[in-house]
Image (cartoon, grey):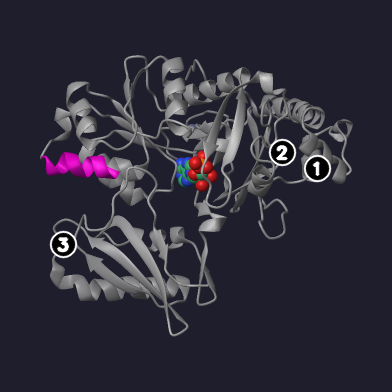
Amino acid sequence: MKYRFIPHYTEEEIKEIQIQGLKNTIKHAYNGSEFYKQRLKDAGITPEDIRSLDDLKYLPFTTADDLRENYPFPFLSVPQKDVVRIHSSSGTTGKRKVLAYTQNDIETWKNMMARCFELAGLNEEDRVQIAVGYGLWTAGVGFQLGCEHFGAMALPLGPGNLKMHLQFLLDLRPTCLCSTASMALLLAEEVQKLGLNPDEISLKKALFGAEPHTPKMRKRVEEILGLEHTFDIPGMTELYGPGTGLECMAHMGIHYWADIFILEIINPETLEPVSDGEIGEMVVTTLKKEASPLIRYRTRDLSRKIPGVCPCGLKMPRHDKILGRSDDMFIFRGVNIYPGTIAEVLEKFKEISSEYQIILTRKNGVDHMLLKVERSKGVSKDIDANLAKEISNALRKQLLVRVEVEIVDLGKLPRTFGKSKRVIDERED
Ligand code: AMP
Ligand code: ZN
């Protein structure tokens, strides 16, 4: 396969680019940013100490707290006159994260996104309906930049406004949708409600980012909209924005742009790298970022590297889908639980839809978990009691805690244009 945007590096070439990029980044950050200089000095490191990729492990970690403490220009390593844009992400607590970009950073990002469209098999004839947020967020502008650079037609609708999305689906016939999986589900269900069939719209592909989604959710959207392929697209504001990699058509993991950043997977407790293929926290070091370089930045996202070469032939390495964030974990009756683990258990029950909501309450000092799920289309209410019991048993087996399961009608759980909120914690501290 000949690509226009995706480079055909061998493993060796990638390694060489990484070593050079690591050296450059450390030198650049050390000389350009007081914060980094101090952090590296504290760790007893000067740029000359970096000689091989093995030296990565001596570098100090950086975190979202470092970003917030150095608000509003954390990690800034170039004079402010070279900054052409900023983006921001709300984060979950405290101050916003603000990230700066030079013109070269924008070029790199645009190229990363163009690679994604290329790997998804689009061409210049494609029309891309962009249904993610525009403005301060990286999402809208990232997809837009990449789409235009790639040469396809961007339809920059943003999220929300279902009526307009539907009108565009029918009139402008986009062939590719870029959205969260939640937004795609909302749109698909609206298409279904209106009784439209896939032939009346021309969508063939979709790129889902910003939140984890399950195979069930994907399948439902694919079926209703008649899609040929859907792709998981990861990304984060700190690392340019969306488009740090993409699934290829083999759908066996996400190829990430290893010539643009180094990915490490560490054990979040010991901070040591895990062995190849094991799950841990993703830690990223950028190789050519100018304005806000990242050195061993702890993303809090959990995933694993996928060893071996992908059947598609592309040598860019792969990581698994993002399985969740370490800060998504909640403690219930002393047990650490990730929503993703619950989603995995639910995946096996075809009688329920892809949607679920976890409600945590505390009565008389005792924690209680209520899990709401939706009955799939065509499934009779008569089996509710039995089904609830079966789901509860399966969860108990997996999580070792008791969960009350309530089955509601299809479409009763909240739908969203953005990222779905799966856990509602009403317990008081
Ligand atoms: P933001 O801070 O708004 O840039 O959001 C970045 C975060 O969104 C990441 O750190 C992930 O936790 C999450 N995220 C982004 N893309 C995906 C994806 N494809 N799958 C799962 N989570 C994602
Ligand atoms: Zn592949």
Residue extending farthest to the bottom is 364
Residue at image location 29% in from the left, 76% down from the top: 389
**In what element is the residue under mark 1?**
helix
**In front: 23, or 294?**
294
Residue receiving disc 3: 379
Q: Which amino acid does label 2 sit on?
A: Ile
**In what element is the residue under mark 2?**
loop
Residue receiving disc 1: 39
Q: How far apart are marks 2 and 1 (CA)?
A: 10 Å
Q: Which amino acid does label 1 sit on?
A: Arg
Image quadrant assignment for residue 193: top left
Q: Which amino acid does label 3 sit on?
A: Val
Q: Distance between the residues labelled 3 and 1?
A: 58 Å
| Pair 3/1: label in front | 1
Asked whether mark 3 lies closer than 8 Å to ligand 1, one says no
**Labels 3 and 1: the sequence-earlier one:** 1
- Quick check: 157 left or right of 277? left
Q: How far apart are marks 2 and 3 (CA)?
A: 51 Å
**In what element is the residue under mark 3?**
loop
Can residue 174 be seen in the rendering of this structure?
A: yes
| Pair 2/3: label in front | 2
Residue receiving disc 2: 295
Assess whether mark 1 and mark 2 are in contact (beta carbons under 8 angstroms). Answer: yes
Badge number at residue 82: none
Q: What stretch is highlighted in magenta?
A: 185-194
